[in-house]
Image (cartoon, rainbow, N blue to C red):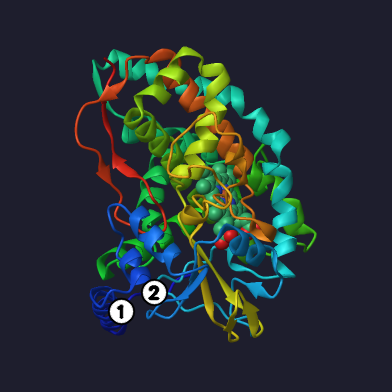
Amino acid sequence: MTTPPDAGLRARMAGYYDILNKTADGGDLYAKLLQGPEDPYPIYEKIRALGPMSRSAFGAWVTTDHTIANKVLRDRRFGVRLADGQKVPEFMNFDNSMLGLDPPHHARLRKLTIPALNPRMAEQWRGRAEQLCDDMIDEVLAGGGQFDLMTEFAQKLPTTVIADLVGIPDELRPRFSRLSRRIAPLLDGVVSFHKVRGVDLAIGELTEMFRHIIALRQREPGDDLISQMLPAVAEGKLSMDELEPLCMFLPLAGSETTVNLIGNGVRALLAHPEQWEMLRDDPGSHAAGVVEETLRFDPPVQQYRRVAHHEIELAGEVLPVDSELAILAAAANRDPAVFDDPHRYDITRKSASGTLSFSAGIHYCLGAPLARVEAEAAIRALATRLPRLRPAGEPRRRDSFIIRGLLHLPLSTG
Ligand code: HEM
């Protein structure tokens, strides 16, 4: 699945960072974003001021415009691969399953996965998610007044739910969690050579682990996604070479994102005490609003890319074949043409569901219903059972530009 990192890679990465830093120092705003700034939102506004579409000296076209982004995501002249079907070269060569495929292969994989992740199935996880949240809060309360929201709560919920959903046997779960955390930098965009090597080793171990689990489910099918997908393999609709990456991609896509939706939500609530009080006074009515507004205001996936498969004219610019367009979803979510008073965090906002936080078009997040169920359960449980929640130390941010979230958020139960 991956090629081992080598001296050539180390040199290419060093070259990449050298150019990135020089371009950013030269004032290129997109290059500044790729450096993973503490607060990207002021940079988004400066990019917006350049117009609906701008060209970064770093190579990509960039948009913050909600209407353009929405249109591009639904336009079949754009894809995720190069026009000739090759993958866009990256430092980390991970097979991200359907998210890395254009039609027609994309539709086949997606269709096979829908039964396990449709909104009705997501709803069936609500009880389990609520129970897990309650158990974790019991542990927090038993442990005294202080805890780390990220490591003791937010990370555990989606990892457990996805492990149940995919069908990871209990005895392999601690190892699965450790390996999942080690491959997490995959979603962070370009990272250091050291991290690439760590990710590569973890992918190798995780692949072996899934081969073992798939063989186990072939012998003893269960009520899980792997067991549900195996008949498609037997019928020739899905190859083993596609099932393995799918099994590895889902936990990554489903946990590293949802973890940060919970963390970003709690951080936003504590930074806006009046919103926290409104939630705390009526968690049942406001938990869903918190989730939607957090997705808009501080989304876990800040940006993604599309590639022009034809020469395309867009907003007065001509994009040549194979040009990359960075869709700054977090900025589109604050487009003043679509959202009133866009920089205000308001959990009662009515228009929040028009965000691009789960993308749009054919790659629209398959896990969106499940992510909403989990995050709602988490926010509701925290507000109901820990009404005096407050910050108890400096949060530590995750060092990345694609995924935005926290590694640590120390809190006190009050
Ligand atoms: C808050 C949580 C989540 C966020 C913000 C999120 C965000 C996204 C985004 C932005 C994309 C599309 C990227 C693009 O268009 O290039 C995507 C795709 C996807 N997500 Fe999620 N996701 C979340 C949770 C989940 C969960 C819980 C699962 C599974 C259990 C999941 C599974 C997927 C899959 C399979 C795709 C690929 C869909 C396709 O290519 O057709 N996601 N997600």
Task: Classify mark 1: residues with Cα within 10 Å, few (<14), some (14-19) or many (20+).
Answer: few
**Is 141 left, or right, of 322 in this rendering?**
left
Is residue 246 visible in the rendered image? The answer is no
Q: Position of residue 199 (x, y in %)?
A: 36, 62
Q: Position of residue 278 (x, y in %)?
A: 45, 19
Residue sticking out furthest to the right: 235
Q: Quadrant of residue 392?
A: top left
SS category of the residue bearing label 2: loop
Name the residue rendered at 65%, 44% in the picture.
225
Tell me if residue 183 comes above or below residue 257 in the rendering: below
Q: For the residue marked with disc 1, what is the amino acid?
A: Tyr
**Is 207 left, or right, of 316 in this rendering?**
left
Name the residue rendered at 63%, 45% in the picture.
217
Q: Earlier in the sequence, mark 1 or mark 2?
A: 1
**Is 39 left, or right, of 170 in this rendering?**
left
Name the residue rendered at 32%, 32% in the picture.
271
Q: Position of residue 198 (x, y in %)?
A: 31, 62
Q: For the residue marked with disc 2, what is the amino acid?
A: Phe
Is residue 236 visible in the rendered image? The answer is yes
Tell me if residue 199 comes above or below residue 143 in the rendering: below
| Residue hosting label 2 | 91
| Residue hosting label 1 | 16
Number of labels in the image equals 2
Task: Classify mark 2: residues with Cα within 10 Å, few (<14), some (14-19) or many (20+).
Answer: some
Name the residue rendered at 35%, 24% in the picture.
273
In this rendering, which labeled residue sits more in front, label 1 or label 2?
1
SS category of the residue bearing label 1: helix
Q: Do labels 1 and 2 touch, CB within 8 Å?
A: yes
Between 344 and 290, the residue placed more toward the observer is 344
Between 279 and 225, the residue placed more toward the observer is 279
Tell me if residue 209 comes above or below residue 59 in the rendering: above
